[in-house]
Image (spheres, grey):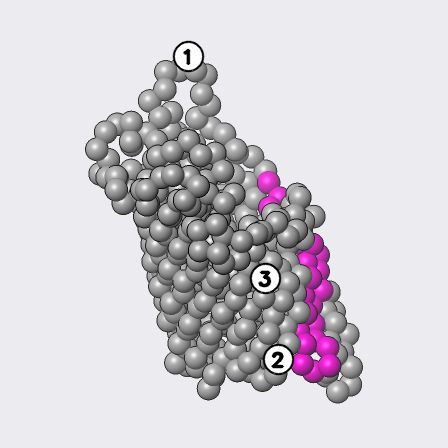
Amino acid sequence: MKYNRIFAIAMAAMLSVSTFAENEKNENTETPNNEEILSKMDMENGVIPIADDRGFTLQSKDGNFVFKPYMYLQGTLNYRYYDDEGLDKAYNQDNVANSGFAMPYAIIGFTGKAFGKIDYNISINAAGSGGNILQQAWIDYAVSPALRFRAGKFKTPFTHAYLTTLGETLFPQVPTSLTASSIMPYSLNAVTPTIGTGFDLGFEVHGIIKNKFGYEVGIFNGTGSSVNTATKGFSDDNHLPSLLYAGRLTYMPNGPMPLTQGNAKMQNLNKMLIGISANYNNEAESESTNDFRAGLEFAWLYNKWYFAAEGYYMHVGFTDRQKIDETLNYWGAYAQVGYFVAPQWQLGVRYDFMDRNGSGKDGVLNMPAAVVNYFVPKTNIKLSAMYQYIGRTGHATQLDRDMDDLGVSKHTACVMMQFAF
């Protein structure tokens, strides 16, 4: 155990050199107006912020037509240590697994505008497989800032952690409470819903009213990012289309909140977001359950600081054909803080919490984490190093304790390098 901790600490410290050179020049220290930078930075594509200094742009004289190709690469070095769950060593269980180098994202795409009213975006993730190769593809028609229509494959309106632009997150990995599969008391192999919903195919109406109030209402397949085909039918229980119905409302008192959790180019902003969201996946999980989710979110960018907190809930009810009367309830929450200790150095901490085995059983997961981010000047390269520990508490039996973190590593260390233009 001592060596695991030493290794994790070393991984997290790789990028946090003991001194931050005071003479290090950042092109942003001569700070232009951050609102001006924000107005030129397009984060709508959900992958990277497309600012004027990133790559190449083709644009018509009147500005009604814009074409901008982009690229996003992310490579990681991972170390994951799993608890042996009380199994005898004769089972030859490997405590260290799913470790080594990985390439989660190798995205190429293009985004832009057409006719002065349409935004469009398409991105291909060459590191994905199956339906995930098409990461997203959509068009967005704006009648006005308060009334816009979007259709295609894009992020469902749920949780600040997922809706943040991919290259702008504080941590290399989103909270585990959003990605870990729920533990079910029944042997239904297809039923392992997660609280997070991520990308999906669908249609939504959205907009910003009076530059403060945002809304998103849409319908989606509910099959997630790995399915690009039409596979749904009608519900046997309530005779509605078997789709994901989702909505989100936000209040931004200081104007639209940029989709970032800390950007070295924007360290003099004061932007806040308070939001609520909910969705209902009608006959989800291979027509075996109906899943309802709800969430509360808060995010605040204040100069060099970034604060965020979210709580979310998932109710799982079985369809009539399953002949199971029991319903299950899961919930999770996290809070995280980031701070630029120097123009290019950002430190962050996060506390993540999840009731993974359902509220009917005792026991929860506690998942503290820390991160160091370094933005390499004039290169669009970001380096990150994070460490997360998963603890278990409150379980009634040792078996319940062993079951609760199945498939989730007790110690996680990750070093990430990303490049975008």
Q: Please give the residue where the numbered disc 2 appears in the rendered image.
A: 142
| Residue found at x 71% / y 64% | 110
- Left-right relation of 357 to 285: left
Query: In the image, which disc is placed on residue 152?
Result: none
Query: Are the two marked residues, 1 and 3, in contact with CB atoms closer than 8 angstroms?
Result: no
The residues colored magenta run 102-125
**Mark 1 against mark 3, which lies toward the viewer?**
3
Instruction: Bin the neighbour count of mark 3 within 10 Å (Cα to Cα): few under 14, some 14-19, many 20 and up.
Output: many
C-beta proximity under 8 Å, tags 2 and 3: no
The amino acid pointed to by label 1 is Ala
Magenta span contains residue 122? yes
Q: Quadrant of residue 311?
A: bottom left
Report helix, strand or loop for mark 1.
helix
Q: Residue at x 47, y 83 (%)?
A: 209
The answer to whether residue 213 is above or below residue 347 is: below
Q: Position of residue 301 (x, y in %)?
A: 41, 71
Q: Main secondary structure of the magenta part?
A: strand
Q: Mark 3 — residue?
A: 202
The mark that comes first in sequence, 1 or 2, is 1
Give the alpha-carbon distance from disc 1 to disc 3, as whole Å: 49 Å
| Mark 2: amino acid | Ala
Q: Is residue 166 magenta?
A: no
Specify the amino acid type for callout 3.
Gly
**Identity of the residue drawn at 38% across and 67% down:** 276
Q: Nearer the viewer, residue 133 or 307?
A: 133
Q: Which residue is mark 1?
A: 90
Of the pair 66 and 100, the residue shown nearer to us: 66
